[in-house]
Amino acid sequence: MAIMNIHTDNEFRLRFKDLWRLIGNSPLLVINFRYKGQNRTIYAKAEHYNITGSIKDRMALYILEKAYHDGKIKAEDTIVEATSGNTGIAFAAIGRALGHNVRIVMPDWMSKERIDIIKSLGAKIIPISKEQGGFLGSIELSEKIAAEEPDIFLPRQFSNEANALAHERTTGPEIWCQLTYHGIIPDAFVAGVGTGGTVMGVGRFLKQMKPGIKIHPLEPSESPTMSTGHKVGSHRIQGISDEFIPALIKLDELDSIVAVPDGDSILMAQKLAKQLGLAVGISSGANFLGALQIQNAMGSESNVVTVFADCNKKYLSTDLMREEPVKAGYESTDVELINFRVYKRVCDNCCDMFGCELKPYTRVK
Ligand code: PMP
């Protein structure tokens, strides 16, 4: 059932332009803190500002816009995607806004909030147990559905280059605009890897602007899939390290892999909420600590940027809401959060993806 058919180029343009007004151009948080007595600052994009509350809205909208632009999706198509949660929420909402039915294939151990949000948006959930193959089983089933049923559109977030391109065209330029407007040049970018779209896309844009910038992918210490090449252990940082190295990740384009313990990430996310009122998800705690590790290596004055991928509301039934034991080697205990400022300069490129070219940004060495 298609509520809204896109018949003309103008309808296409207007429809997506409207949706881009609800997605992207997120504020950049300038977080001031003390670490072992030193004054420090780390920059983080507040991605819960997107329509469904996560960074995945960017790639969902970009993939659908590109599919319409390239004639790869029809109005009557059902969108089917394998996802650990935020992507499902993004496709469920944006898919509906465009008139599509949506089916989400998902491991059955994801938080109850994620499942209920997807259902509330009218999408159908197909739960996959560990015995049925977990995450990889979810991807296999989505491919099987597309092979066997008519009128199916598969976004294929793990291998679709449009996922990384979404961040190369929006998140990366926004970070560059928001920092350089204030005279700040980033030295490094750190991001936890789910599909790898964020780290690859932002990395590619920032490298065009400043070839010497460091781009670090992040993974949980308990489950170092990228470092070992295969699934190891389990972890509690939902949204990252999903059992395999995604096809989008090109480790030879990236700098060293950063590892952060899940318990420390939970403590850091709790601290950001309790001390600064920044109610972020567990991967945001991990990203903050990853950025801190890189800042420790590059120097306390270095400008390290990361993303807060979502807020804490999807984790109210998880360990994020419980008391987390402090273990030896944790860094969050040495972080004394002071306050934050907000940079909200709007990047002009992010509302009309196929109607404009990237502006000639000022590059640096
Ligand atoms: N954090 C959270 C909470 C996520 O849902 C995701 C996406 N799975 C990520 C981080 C990682 O983003 P990406 O897929 O772009 O690597």
Image: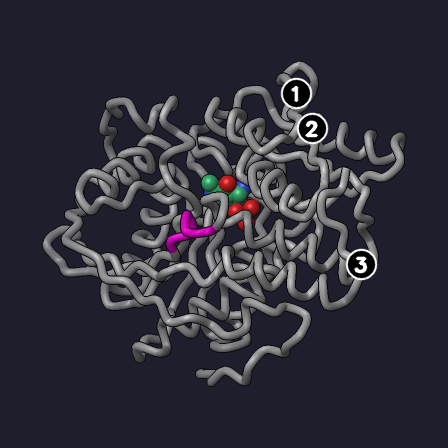
For the record, the magenta segment spans 46-50
Q: Residue at x 40, y 64 (%)?
A: 188
Q: What is the quadrant of residue 330 in the picture? A: top left
Q: Please, which colouring scheme is shown? A: one colour
What's the CA distance linking mark 3 and mark 2?
33 Å
Q: Is residue 318 above or below residue 213?
A: above
Say if mark 1 contacts mark 3, CB within 8 Å: no
Q: Which residue is mark 2?
A: 138
Of the numbered discs 2 and 1, the one sitting upstream in the chain is 1
Q: Is residue 168 magenta?
A: no
Residue density around tag 1, few if under 14, some if 14–19, many if 20 or more, within 10 Å: many
Amino acid beneath label 1: Ile
Say if mark 2 contacts mark 1, CB within 8 Å: yes
What's the CA distance linking mark 2 and mark 1?
6 Å
What's the CA distance linking mark 1 and mark 3?
37 Å
Q: Is residue 103 left or right of residue 200?
A: right
Residue density around tag 3, few if under 14, some if 14–19, many if 20 or more, within 10 Å: few
Location of residue 224 in the rendering, given as x and y in whole percent from the top left corner: 50, 37
Nearer to the camera, 317 or 353:
353
Q: Which residue is mark 3?
A: 7
Label 2 residue SS: helix
Q: Is residue 48 magenta?
A: yes
Q: Which residue is mark 1?
A: 128
Q: Residue at x 66, y 20 (%)?
A: 128
